[in-house]
Amino acid sequence: MLKHEYNPHSTSNDDVVTTRLDKLVNFFSNTGPAWARKNSLWPLPFATACCGIELMATGASRYDIGRFGAEAMRFSPRQSDLLICAGRVAIKMMPVLQRIYQQMTEPKWVISMGACASTGGVFDTYAVVQGVDQFLPVDVYVPGCPPRPETLIEGVMAIQRMLDSGELKNSAERGRGLRMVVEPLVQVAVPNSAAELR
Amino acid sequence: MATQQEIIDILAQRFGDIDFAPAPLLLRGKLAGRQMHVRVPAGRLIEVLTYLRDEPRCRFEQLIDLTCVDYLNFPDATDRFGVIYSLLSLTHNHRIWLKCFVNDPNPTVPTATKIWKGAEWMEREVFDMFGVRFEGHPDLRRILTWDSFEAHPLRKDYPLRGKGERENYEVISRDSA
Ligand code: SF4
């Protein structure tokens, strides 16, 4: 991207970029820091239940969330900018989650991963939060129980698209609640009859 | 190892004035193993538990479990809450169950923490879930639910979805963060 759009002086066919410093500065002042941010999201894995296992799988070598620049999982809210809320949250846990969100530095985003974090899932009881978005501003909901790693990666990419669209605002300007829902990319053929299943 | 009947006989010998009403443990109306339970009135509970721990023929050193059952709408039940003690003797390898029935309002049982220190958290859980108070407990706070919670959710008359507690919580918006 740099090479073709902003590097008239390149003489190499390889992935080597040469440019003048002032042009580079110019590039960043045009695109804003969003371009850099979107490729280095630092997630905070708030994994409270089984969805956390799938989150770990997403971070591991087979699915490798590092391909999207989000492999630096940080357990300190001060070192992360993407809160991935994976799993059901008990009401007693809610103040902890809120504190963590408040301690994250701007700009920050929130992914609500899985049925439980988004709606409470099957845990419709007095002690379970029926969707963290009731108490927190959520940017992207990732459906599934648990979501496949591909779906979570699509959720991360949805955050990247938000950044791409250029409307990088801080939390106070973004408003609360739903902006995007991640649809599973692959359509699964549902058999109509038992015969088709065989 | 003493049989269940022997333990009950020892108890009946020592506490002739208590009606222990020994009965086998049932599971859906059928016998579940050979274990028995005895009823103990709340007023005599500490006496009986201490005796069971210290009597050389019993030696129940370990409080395996301390829990509670809400017998609201239970067929043939006469009392509401049954606080249940499960004891194990490591010396003799035998067990016994005790039930102590208490009722609304203000169900209260003396604490067993002075006999078995491990009773502390189990009593806190019973208090949290059923609202049974343990007299003399050193630190009777809620243990599982949050501090501002007011109900006792394992009572049979408490709705599964709560009474609005889960909805009435502070909301963090983009502005406040
Ligand atoms: S959505 Fe499913 S996998 Fe995820 S935390 Fe809930 S029950 Fe577990």
Image (cartoon, helix red, strand yellow):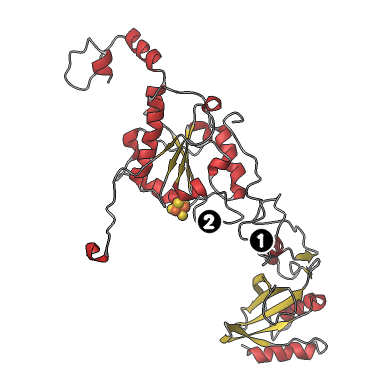
- For the residue pair A188 and A97, the one nearer the viewer reads as A188
On the image, the x and y values in percent for residue B9 come to: 72, 91
- Element type where label 2 sits in the image: loop
On the image, the x and y values in percent for residue A42 come to: 43, 33
Q: Chain of mark 1?
A: B
Which mark, by number, is residue A33?
none
Amino acid under disc 2: Phe
Where is the C terminus of chain A found, in terms of image quarters?
A: bottom left
Amino acid under disc 1: Pro
Q: Is residue B50 in view?
A: yes
Residue carrying label 2? A123
Q: Is residue A197 above or below residue B98?
A: above
Q: Is residue A40 in view?
A: no
- For the residue pair B8 and A95, the one nearer the viewer reads as A95
Q: Residue at x 31, y 35 (%)?
A: A67
Q: Residue at x 65, y 74 (%)?
A: B62
Calculate the distance from the C-alpha at mark 1 to the C-alpha at mark 2: 15 Å
Residue closest to the far front? A192
Can you tell me whether the CB of the residue at mark 2 lies under 8 Å from the nearest atom of ligand 1?
yes
Quarter of image, res A185: top left
Q: Residues within 10 Å of mark 2 (few under 14, many from 20)?
A: some
Quarter of image, res B20: bottom right
Q: Residue at x 60, y 54 (%)?
A: A127
Q: Residue at x 71, y 49 (%)?
A: B148
- Element type where label 1 sits in the image: loop
Q: Is residue B34 above or below residue A188?
A: below
Q: Chain of mark 2?
A: A
Q: Residues within 10 Å of mark 1 (few under 14, many from 20)?
A: many
Quarter of image, res B126: bottom right
Q: Is residue B43 above or below residue A79?
A: below
Residue carrying label 1? B153
